[in-house]
């Protein structure tokens, strides 16, 4: 028998609906890749947890033979995500850039597909309410020719066993974190005010939300990042959003203006040297600069998040 090496929400309003995961925002994604799932893959293996963030857990896996010392035969990079809004093959194609097919496993709809090397093999376990557990395995750079799909299938078997047990682990967010907040319901009034009226609300996973009114757009997303974070566009300008450090950058032209604000909200729940960052994007048609409005929106977002305590 193999042993470890070296070891003996409602889419229209954003409101959270009943979930098989309990509170999906606090569900520990790492539990869906249990050690026992990898025993059939090789005589020996080593599974290392490398990173956790909002709704996602990352691992490295190496397989080895029985020689002394063990000879590594393959290596993979694994991820587990808890997701929402995944109800069809088109949803997987849009989000993960992989074509999938559906089959029934243990009474559940499971989506399976293989993408490019940077995508690997993807398995999606459908839950009630268009929620899902998405598992992926791709080759490590040291073993580019190994087949990651048996590993993805092993992850699928392990995740189904955890779900069947009904004994799910949750990691409550610490006091002060916005990780357990329903961003859609909490921030709809703030986002609508920035857009000048009622907007269409769409959750972005369990840790983000977007609001659309015509060609105008607001999105808000939580992440764990260092400070300052790495802006990809524009030149960030520092300011204070309420009593929080913030950076704002802008892009656009005469017909469409977009500004991004990142706020250092609190310490990261996942890493001692990172912060919980709230990213706010405001995009407005017919304007060349919405930086002042975006800064005010970010300040209002901080105020709304703080007021829920």
Image (cartoon, rainbow, N blue to C red):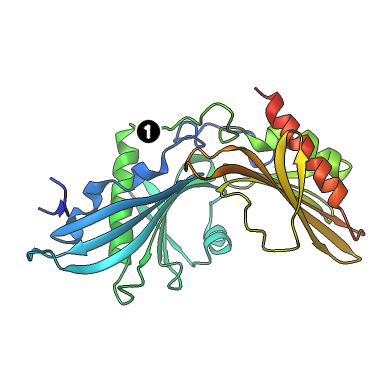
Judge by depth and name the residue closer to the eye, 44 or 120: 44
Image coordinates of residue 264 in percent, x first then y, are 65, 42
Element marked by disc 1: loop
The residue wearing badge 1 is 169
> In the figure, is residue 281 to the left or right of 28?
right
Instruction: Single out the residue that lies furthest toward the bottom.
Output: 145
> In the figure, is residue 163 to the left or right of 180?
left
Judge by depth and name the residue closer to the eye, 237 or 50: 237
- Tell me: residue 220, above or below residue 92: above
Judge by depth and name the residue closer to the eye, 157 or 282: 282
Judge by depth and name the residue closer to the eye, 207 or 211: 207
> In the figure, is residue 71 to the left or right of 54?
left
**Residue at (56%, 61%) from the top-left corner?**
90
Instruction: Place residue 162 in its image quadrant.
Output: top left
Question: Is any part of residue 106 visible from this angle?
Answer: no
> In the figure, is residue 104 to the left or right of 228?
left
Instruction: Single out the residue that lies furthest toward the top.
Output: 309
Q: Residues within 10 Å of mark 1 (few under 14, many from 20)?
A: some
Q: Quadrant of the C terminus?
A: top right
- Tell me: residue 48, above or below residue 301: below
Instruction: Place residue 170 in its image quadrant.
Output: top left
Image coordinates of residue 206 in percent, x first then y, are 57, 42
Question: Is any part of residue 8 visible from this angle?
Answer: yes
Image coordinates of residue 88 in percent, x first then y, are 53, 56
Image coordinates of residue 268 in percent, x first then y, are 53, 40
Question: What is the tally of numbered marks visible in this picture?
Answer: 1
């Amino acid at each position: 028998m193999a042993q470890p090496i070296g070891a003996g929400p409602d889419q229209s309003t954003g409101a959270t609906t009943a979930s098989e995961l309990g509170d999906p925002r606090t569900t520990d994604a790492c539990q869906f890749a249990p050690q026992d799932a990898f025993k059939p893959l090789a005589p020996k293996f080593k599974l290392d947890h490398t990173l956790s963030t909002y709704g996602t857990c990352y691992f490295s896996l190496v397989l080895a033979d029985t020689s002394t010392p063990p000879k590594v035969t393959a290596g993979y990079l694994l991820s587990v995500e808890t997701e929402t809004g995944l109800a069809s093959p088109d949803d997987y194609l849009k989000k993960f850039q992989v074509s999938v097919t559906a089959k029934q496993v243990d009474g559940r709809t499971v989506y399976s597909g293989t993408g490019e090397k940077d995508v690997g093999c993807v398995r999606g376990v459908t839950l009630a309410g268009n929620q899902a557990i998405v598992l992926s395995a791709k080759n490590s750079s040291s073993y580019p020719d190994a087949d990651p799909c048996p590993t993805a299938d092993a992850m699928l078997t392990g995740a189904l066993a955890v779900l069947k047990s009904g004994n799910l682990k949750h990691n409550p967010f610490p006091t002060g974190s916005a990780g357990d907040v329903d961003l859609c319901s909490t921030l709809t009034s703030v986002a609508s005010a920035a857009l000048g009226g009622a907007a269409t609300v769409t959750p972005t996973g369990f840790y983000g939300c977007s609001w659309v009114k015509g060609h105008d757009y607001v999105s808000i997303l939580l992440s764990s990042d260092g400070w300052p974070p790495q802006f990809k566009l524009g030149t960030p300008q520092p300011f204070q959003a309420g009593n929080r450090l913030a950076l704002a950058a802008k892009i656009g032209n005469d017909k469409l203006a977009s500004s991004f604000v990142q706020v250092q909200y609190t310490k990261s729940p996942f890493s001692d040297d990172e912060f919980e960052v709230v990213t706010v994007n405001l995009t407005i048609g017919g304007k060349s600069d919405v930086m002042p409005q975006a800064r005010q929106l970010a300040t209002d977002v901080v105020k709304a998040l703080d007021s829920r305590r």
